[in-house]
Amino acid sequence: MIERLDNRQFDLLTITVAATLAAHIGHLPSWLTLSLAILLPLRAWTRRRDTAKVGAWIRLPLTVLLVALVIANFGNLFGREPGSVLGCGLLALKLLEAERIRDARVALGFAAFVLMSALLFAQDLVFTVLICAVLVLLLATLIGLQPAPLAQQRPLRAQLRLALVLLGASLPLAIATFVLVPRLISPLWGAPGADTAARSGLSDRMAPGSMTDLLIDDSPAFRVDFDATVPPPRQRYFRAIVLWDFDGTTWTRGRSGGRGQLEDVQRAGDAALVGYTITLEPTDRRWLPTLDLPLTAPAAAHLSADRVLVANEPVAQPRQYHVQSATNFMLAPTLSSAARTSALALPAGFDPKTRALAERWRADGKNDDAVIRAALDLFHASFTYTLSPPLLGRDSVDDFLFDTRRGFCEHYSSAFVFLMRAAGIPARVVTGYQGGWWSAKSAYLLVRQSDAHAWAEVWSEGRGWQRVDPTAAVSPARIELGAASANGNPSWAQSDWLRNLRNQFDFANRLWTESIVRFDASRQKSVLTPFGVADANPADLLYALSGVLGIVILIATLWAIRSAGTTRRGDALDRAWALLGKRLARAGMTPRANEGPLDLLQRARAAAPAFAAALEPLIARYIDLRYGVDEPAPERIAAFAAAARKLRLPSHVENLGGATIRNSAASRY
């Protein structure tokens, strides 16, 4: 006999599939998101109308169409993103044919795989907790597929409670396998063919408005642990990318950016070096932010000519690196002819008004320092910092300087560098991060994506490259108080109280990242150090895992034996009746082993009529549950047990003797 899903089971299956797909919603293409939003409710509606069977003539073309769209969108079926999109689509299509218990179990097994694949995109603490919540729902749905009538009678709350118990029981084995199963040097999704689409982070291209999404993104970019002294906010500039070339719209690294001989650094006076460790969130890019100005490069990374730290491979997992920087320095006291040419280049035919302004300053006899001051005074006098600037036209710098006069760091740094080059002063754009939130309790600096910033560097004879931040002339609060003070509150998600709450909660995220996400093969080798194994190899780890599994199995066996010996006999109603008996015994009226419920009630009437009046409704409910139906519903038994707990007992009832209560088939009825 084929067991068909009832409506309750199917609805729970649909909710579980929807929750699983929701875990992937952040990276699904719009065409699939829209299709899923239509397909799942439509499937539930048609099944309610008894048109449950979706024929293969519909499912097969949809499957072929899904595969074709994935290939058209990504170029292949392999990799993290195309694989997850294909899996989500196939899971939704599986729901179309889910009519039997067997179909539902297969769908749930596949849903578990699709759910776990969401961790390939995000592994932070909050997202992992959400994945676990969906996993509990999945287990509850699987419990609901047990053979009737037990599954039909078990309420959803009981299914969820049992799912939590099962998930908790699996934790010891999960922890043991997480710590001791030998790990690969690189994750599976780092294999050839994995997509390399960039995650949140700075780009090596800057155009008007390109940083807007980044500046309203409060997700962590990196965390900094300083070896000793913490630099003040005005020195917390984290260098990431230097942009040399401008085509009239976009700044880029260009062909010469970062190439050539490493620019020389001279520390100013006896300025101390700052040592620190950065834990960078995944970006799928190679840029490694460093406190301006880095002097050293960690392993598997190198410094480009313009002192940008570049990783040898894209950062696909959280990466930790230690660097030394000088916050008081002179960079490149001498400038090569090639670098000078790049730092003075401007696109022909763009922004004539800006060129004329720079030429007028020079005609007035202003030297380099005076030109720089004039530009900063211009920004300070009549410009406004905003994350919602007007759109700019072809001559973007002219439009910004002489028309809109509203923008944020990328507008100011771009216009400033253009002005400097037009005035004959070598200049370049630097992007990175500025500021951050200092956690006094945990002693680390949290830098979010919203702390992204752009500033300028100008070169002068004898002083080399000097940092000039034109944004500070417009919004000093951006530098001294951080991005949140200057960016304002564009939405409730950016409100001060929520930002502060997330900052405080970041300690848990940091602990999660350090302990779980960054637990790789190299750290696994030292996991057995407390037991005398300094550099554990895979065999050592497997021996340790076998020992842990043996201990877990032994403990589970002993617990099962003990539970079997102490488990009360009888069903749930027997246990509820026994609970009532214990409460009666505490009041001084111990039920006798040879009396049934009516005998007990009659004895209570003779001993304490007032007490018997309160007891009588419970006795009647028990008799109805035990003898009135073949198998009482679990909800009614639970209600009886709750009523027994709430029964108000008098302070003293004459003890007529008796043993602990037992359900007797020989009761007087």
Image: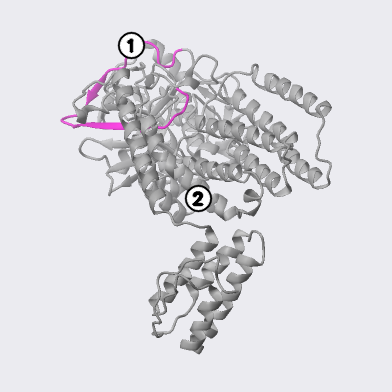
* Tag 1 secondary structure: loop
Q: Residues within 10 Å of mark 2 (few under 14, many from 20)?
A: some
Residue found 80% across the figure and 40% down from its top: 52
**In front here: 628 or 247?**
628
Q: Residue at x 58, y 70 (%)?
A: 622
Q: Position of residue 541 (x, y in %)?
A: 31, 23
Other residues around mark 1 within 10 Å, as few (<14) / some (14–19) / many (≥20): few
Q: Quadrant of the N terminus?
A: top right
At label 1, the amino acid type is Gln
Image position, residue 442 (x, y; %): 28, 45
Marks 1 and 2, the one that precedes in the sequence: 1
Q: Is residue 213 visible?
A: yes
What label sits on residue 167 in the rendered view?
A: none
Q: In which image quadrant can residue 237 be found?
A: top left
Q: Position of residue 661 (x, y in %)?
A: 45, 69
Circles 1 and 2: CB atoms closer than 8 Å? no
* Residue 226 as seen in the image, left or right of residue 646: left
Q: Quadrant of residue 104?
A: top right
Q: x, y percentage for residue 114?
A: 58, 31
Residue nearest the viewer, comparing 368 with 604: 604
- Residue beneath label 1, please? 261
Q: Is residue 299 magenta?
A: no
The stretch of residues the image draws in magenta is: 256-285
Residue flagged by tag 2: what amino acid is it?
Gln
User: Closer to the camera: disc 1 or disc 2?
Assistant: 2
Residue assigned mark 2:
494
**Which residue is at the front of the view, 596 or 494?**
596
Find the distance from the CA under tag 1 to the CA under tag 2: 43 Å
